[in-house]
Image (cartoon, rainbow, N blue to C red):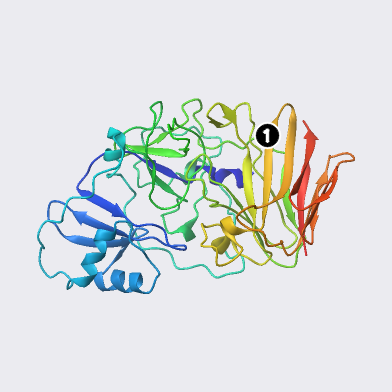
Amino acid sequence: MKRFLIAASAVVATANPHLHKHRHLHEHAARAAATVTDIVATKIVFEALGTPLSQDEACSKVAAGLLTWKNSADATVCSQPAQTSAPPPPPPPPASSSSSPSAGAGQFFNSPPAVGAPAAAPSGGAWTDSSVTGLNADFPDGTLDCGTFPSAYGAMPVPYMGMNGWIGLQDVGAGVSGAAINTIHTLLAGDNCREASCAPGQSVGGLACSGGKLRLTNTSTKKLCDAGMGGVQAQNQASGVVAICRTDYPGTEAETVPMSLQPGSTQPMNNPNGATGYQWQGKSTSAQYYLNPIGTSAENGCKWGDGSQPIGNWAPINLGVGFSDGKTWLSIFQNKPTQLAPYQGKVQITGDIGNQVCSYENGVYTGVSGSNGDGCTVAVNAGGSATYVISN
């Protein structure tokens, strides 16, 4: 069941103004950087994914294309000598284009204390789904500091993301639960566990950092994580590691929830209950997974990509899993229009599916109605089980 636990590995940041104002940069490939200005001392500090950088380091990485600015005005610091004394006060940040009070308040956020980013993990599936503890423990709402990763309550840390175990941070402005959110700024990556109310159709989930403490965004339960309906798993019969990445939804909606399958291994997949799970604008939701090419590690594949490789959100195949109307619905489909390239491998759904069929091979999807280039779907009756089998 450990595959479901990482759903809680995200924190939602609310507007609790503190000493520093953070001006974040857009993600570029797998990294992002931020310029952090101390309003009191007016000392400029450079930061990338929580890791402090010198001015020379930051500017050289931007010049090399490894990092990019969110606020183009920040680029001017690279034309200035590195600080040796306090500079003049920085110009005010650009005014928000939204008239919503919460959008303006979203310039501030609480975040875990910055620590050095972990060393890059080697390729080939070095990251593994470690055992977890406290899955059934009640979460101490409003007790843990925002800098504490809640591994004692079922959450599985993902250190290679460089965010102290979290898979994502969101700045939602002044409110989280119960209030409409007009603007969401993705600070680093993703999230997943439960819900809040979002006006523009964006989703918020995980834990809220409010008043310096972690709080549940789903007030209907005292648990941090939800295992779903079960009965669905993935099996690797290929010659190399297989990384399957679930969309962190509700959250930043990036495919950052990792599953790493070594050859011969099997792991469960999240099967959300449409009746009791997250509702988007009154509609039930399901889980969406991205199937990376055989041999791609979770460290490389379960991140937002730039399109230079068919991995992550650019992976060729999506897998859909969800429970509704008394049945589990499973699908295999092409990641259109993002990726038209064929998947180099085979995928088949086996198990309690009766005479139904759903498989993929050589760019062709075969379902109950025949073959096509788009996808296929099967249903599993309640109490049954099924397996996605991936092979060469």
Q: Is residue 273 toward the left or the right of residue 97 in the image?
A: right
The quarter of the rendered structure image containing the N terminus is: top right
Quarter of the picture containing the C terminus is bottom right
Q: Is residue 295 left or right of residue 140?
A: right
The x and y percentages for residue 297 are: 60, 64
The secondary structure type at the circle numbered 1 is loop
Residue 363 vs residue 315, the one in the foreground: 363
Which residue is drawn at the image coordinates 37% and 66% (left, top)?
67
**Picture coordinates of residue 128 (x, y %)?**
59, 59
- Disc 1 crowd, CA 10 A, few/some/many (<14, 14-19, 20+): some
**Residue under the image location 34 percent in, 73 percent down:** 63
Question: Is residue 115 positioned above or below 124 on the image?
Answer: above
In this rendering, does residue 70 appear at all?
yes
Q: Residue furthest right?
A: 355
The reply, left or right, for residue 27 in relation to residue 385 is left
Can residue 15 be spotted in the picture?
no
The foreground one among 308 and 357 is 308
The image position of residue 344, as x and y in percent, is 73, 65
Q: Is residue 207 above or below residue 42?
A: above
- The residue carrying mark 1 is 229
Q: Quadrant of residue 12?
A: top left
The amino acid on which the numbered mark 1 sits, given as a three-letter code, is Met
Name the residue: 41% across, 54% down: 164
Residue 324 percent location from the top left of the image: 69, 30
